[in-house]
Image: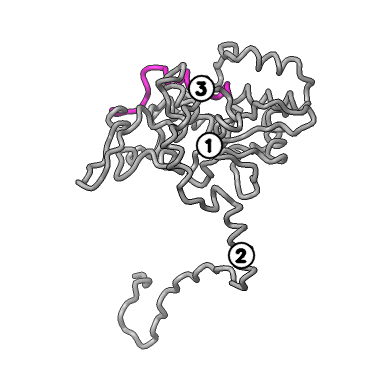
Amino acid sequence: MLSTELAQITYAQIIDGLPITDVAWDRRLPGIMGEHMINDHETLCPGAWEKAHEYYKEWDPSSLKFDPETLKAFQIAEPGSKSFNMRLVELVAVSLHQIAVWLHKLEPHLHQGDIDAVTYWEMPLSETMARFPPGPTLFSHHDYLDDDIYPEGVADMVGYWAEDRILGGVTVFDRRPESPDEIPNIYFHPCRKSQTIRVYQLRDEQQQALFDFLLQEEPGSLPSPLPILGDKQNRVRVDAPRALTHHHIYRDIWERRPLTIIEMRIFDRRPKDEPDYPEVGDMIRRINAQGGIPLPQPRPRSLSPLIRQDSGEKNYRDRD
């Protein structure tokens, strides 16, 4: 896992102290806006990539700490069983999180500039605009921002961000009692721009691809499936605010502060769109089909203007 380029570029950004521009903007719910100063951070600062590779080679896994109950469940599970695989994924997610926490706490970071000036930059506001103060770090997932209750504070925010960038989402689990014969209920809570903001269960083939990758005997013998991204076929979904409180889907009970009653009412009144609720698109297409309404077709691309043979003037496509 740590040998993948995706993991190393993720950790290199933490060592740098700021995410690169493309990554900073790659989120469904904006954490930045306007002509943000992060736009100037298009590449890693010198030494960050090399430092990440150095940490990978020298990393000591004995420094990791796991929940005793999770570790015990993993140790007693039969290798290759569903319980074994599910616990393995949980230990991997916790490991990725802890490494990010550790790297964030290292000083100094390698960014050649004022990290705080970029992190706390605010867009100039007009009289009609509301102020949304920036968070304590640009390494953040939109739903894991409660640094005041996290054991490692802001560093845990960075850990959740790293999970999302490497795996494809913060890894959470159905904590309700389940039958040993059931498929492991592994859920992702993504943050990327093209992903749903809901918590969704990985499909069987997605889980199996992850298991196979983690259990391969020879590193590099299988192509990396990471990041694992959801699509319309991931139909087992729950609203993020209810995942923890109603469905018992979480990794740690303290990872997200529940919404207030007022916040929940606002959440429930928001429009539902197809990227988050695929069944909405199904319903619209079914209603249209019953009414004989044809499916909307994408608009044809605009064609370039024809070149007039009798025109002596140069066209914008002409080259000297």
Rate crowding at label 1 as few (under 14), some (14 to 19) or many (20 or more) other CA atoms within 10 Å.
some
Q: Gap between marks 3 and 2, in whole Å?
A: 42 Å
Q: Gap between marks 3 and 1, in whole Å?
A: 14 Å
Which quarter of the image is occupied by the C terminus?
A: bottom left
Per the rendered image, the range of residues in magenta is: 94-114
Label 2 element class:
helix
Q: Amino acid at mark 2?
A: Ile
In primary-sequence order, the first of circles 2 and 1 is 1
Circle 2 sits on which residue?
Answer: 287
Q: Residue at x 58, y 61 (%)?
A: 284
Circle 3 sits on which residue?
Answer: 254
Q: Residue at x 65, y 32 (%)?
A: 186
Q: Amino acid at mark 3?
A: Trp
Q: Could you tell me residue 148's position as x and y percent?
A: 40, 21
Q: Quadrant of residue 239?
A: top right
Q: Nearer the viewer, mark 2 or mark 1?
A: 2
Label 1 element class:
helix
| Residue 5 in magenta stretch | no
Circle 1 sits on which residue?
Answer: 240
299 up-or-down from 50: above or below: below
Q: How many marks?
A: 3
Q: Nearer the viewer, residue 255 or 65?
A: 255
Q: Residue at x 34, y 72 (%)?
A: 316
Q: Nearer the viewer, mark 3 or mark 2?
A: 2
Residue 5 visible, this angle: no
